[in-house]
Amino acid sequence: MWKGDYSFLIRQLVIKDFKIRYRNMSLGIFWALLNPLIMVVLFSFIFKQVFPSSIPHFSLYILSGLIPFNFFTAAWLGATTSLMDNAGLIKKVPVPREVIPVTAVLGNLVHLGIQFLLILAAVFYEGLSVNFHWPWLIVIWGLELVFIFGISLATSSLNVLVRDIRYVVESINLILFWLVPIFYTFDMIPMAYKDLYQYNPVAALVLATRKVILDGQAPPLNLMLKLASVAIVSLLVGESIFRHLKPRFYRYL
């Protein structure tokens, strides 16, 4: 995709994003942990006190779905607006424009790493343990990363031409929150919609993650093939859209 080595620039942009995000905040990176903690407490109250749920290891169940979902939504939205947010840099620095949305996604990957500590804490709190299937998480979330790269390349380039795209992404993220089994189980989904759910890459991501963390098993091969297929197609399509629209950026930035 690119000519030359831009790893140093990407690294510096990720560090810059991390510093800016928590600059002048008294709680620092604790804010990365606060949101999922609040959601776990809220869901635990609702589905244990108001609408009692029989889901075992409920706190871990919520976290293992919420954290990868939050990473997806934050990374996608941040990458979508990244070209407009960095218009000044784009005009000054002669680097591939794809670097900007890719860096925005990688910046959120840092927060995924921080929030992963909550999953580890919940694993031990629930009396479970890390098993030898956990390396599958690298593969699962790696495919999610590829998928986000693809859709981010598409939406970030479209957002330069049509500024409403960011609001479309926000709306889709809101809809996905209810279409991904975060606080309900896959078994509760009517049979007619189960295949559709598994082709939803974000739902498939959550299902595969829980298979490893909660069930201590490798994710099903068919589920991983679906994730891989969607991720590769997303990257190819997203890169194609970005390359097609890139010559028009200077007219709109």
Image (cartoon, helix red, strand yellow):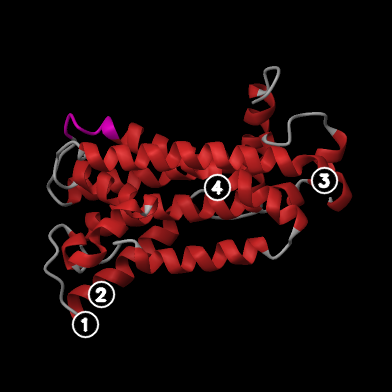
Q: Which residue is mark 3?
A: 248
Residue 63 can be seen, yes or no: no
Direction top: furthest residue: 4
Which is more N-terminal, label 4 or label 3?
A: 4
**Labelled disc at residue 50:** 1
Q: Mark 2–mark 1 contact, CB under 8 Å?
A: yes
Residue, x 70% and y 48% (percent of image)?
Answer: 157
> Which is in the foreground here, disc 4 or disc 1?
4
Residue 201 can be seen, yes or no: yes
Residue, x 73% and y 62% (percent of image)?
Answer: 163
Instruction: Please tell me in which quadrant of the rendered image residue 159 appears.
Output: bottom right
- Magenta span of residues: 131-136
Which is more N-terminal, label 1 or label 4?
A: 1
Q: Mark 4–mark 1 contact, CB under 8 Å?
A: no
Label 4 – label 1 distance at C-alpha: 38 Å
Which is more N-terminal, label 3 or label 2?
A: 2
Residue, x 50% and y 64% (percent of image)?
Answer: 172
Q: Amino acid at mark 2?
A: Phe
Q: Amino acid at mark 4?
A: Ile
Q: x and y percent of residue 248 in the render?
A: 82, 45
Label 2 – label 1 distance at C-alpha: 7 Å
